[in-house]
Amino acid sequence: MLLNLITDIAGISIGHATDLTLGSGVTAILFDEPAVASGSVLGGAPGGRDTALLDPSMTVERVDAFVLSGGSAFGLDAAGGIQSWLRQAGRGFAVGDIRVPIVPQAILFDLLNGGDKDWGLHAPYRDMGYEACRNAAKGVFDLGTVGAGTGATTATFKGGLGSASALGSGGHVIAAIVAVNALGSATIGSGKHFWAAPFEQDGEFGRLGMPPSIDHRMRLKGMNAPATTIGAIMTDAVLTKAEAHRLSIAAHDGLARALLPAHLPLDGDTVFAAATGAKPIETPGTFMELCHLAGIVMARAIARGVHEATALPHEGAQRAWRDL
């Protein structure tokens, strides 16, 4: 039975480090064995680490982990903490007798959400990355205002961390994890209905359906501050690096269906993709179905991230969808 989480794919562990006072956090996505990986960036203001190696033309094919983090550019330290944890475990790309953990990272901007960002000389994200690894586990994990979704916001309601999964007709699992920190909105107009409503499964974000009329006027949380929705799409299928890249692009379709507007000049919308390779693809149509499902599970995961979020404990913090 699926948990409707990315951990429905065997060999993946998720760990969070959450600091509500800081109003930020880190999510570590760890693979038991290096996974074939790629990714794509369609926002105009991305922030990342080791993302260039994900291009299908680059040499390194597999990664040991992904990192999703708050903190904007300061948050890029989180990958260092995760590399330290993986190095202790003897993980990494072999170069002679040295192993270098491969840990691509994407960050989101959460520096203006009311949290206490007076952290002194060094930002706390390296330690938070290490803590996220120590907290990593398989099975059920928390959604909403946790990990990379801790400080996330959107144009209308508090953002958060979401996940969703689906089972393809060939028996392959495909799933998404995403930190929703959009310049635009996951909800329609000023109401509580989600743009992703047509894709909802089993009442996972309120069972509200669509409103009687659609207000598609642009709503932004600001005109100057950057924002980013960052996440990953994964499957247990056997994929090439080029196919993983295509899967990440298909997942962006779900991002655009769940957020309005998306991929703006000040968004940093980034989607990683990975394949654990547990199950071969038997028919040519199977990969196309996985691309189809990638957009759907990403849209569902985005709505779940907003649906599960709770407001930060700061005066003036953005209200959560649940506050309705």
Image (tube, rainbow, N blue to C red):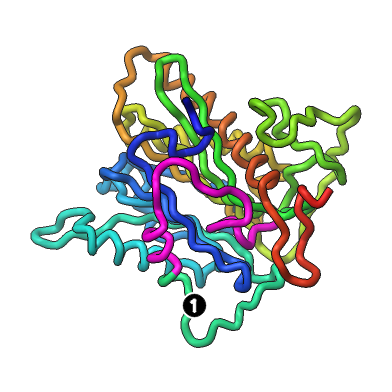
Q: Is residue 250 visible?
A: no
Q: Is residue 239 left or right of residue 295?
A: left
Q: Is residue 205 visible?
A: yes
- Which residue lies under the disc numbered 1? 123
Q: Is residue 302 above or below residue 97?
A: above
Identify the residue shown where x is 49% and y is 34%.
175
Residue 265 in the image, given as x and y percentages of width and height = 66, 55
Rate crowding at label 1 as few (under 14), some (14 to 19) or many (20 or more) other CA atoms within 10 Å. Answer: some
Quarter assignment of residue 22:
bottom right
Identify the residue shown where x is 55% and y is 46%.
178
Q: What secondary structure is the magenta-colored segment mainly?
A: loop
Residue 134 in the image, given as x and y percentages of width and height = 37, 60
For this rendering, which residue is in front, 226 or 28?
Answer: 28
Q: Is residue 91 left or right of residue 45?
A: left
For this rendering, which residue is in front, 316 or 280?
Answer: 316
Magenta segment boundaries in residue numbering: 128-153
Residue 132: within the magenta?
A: yes
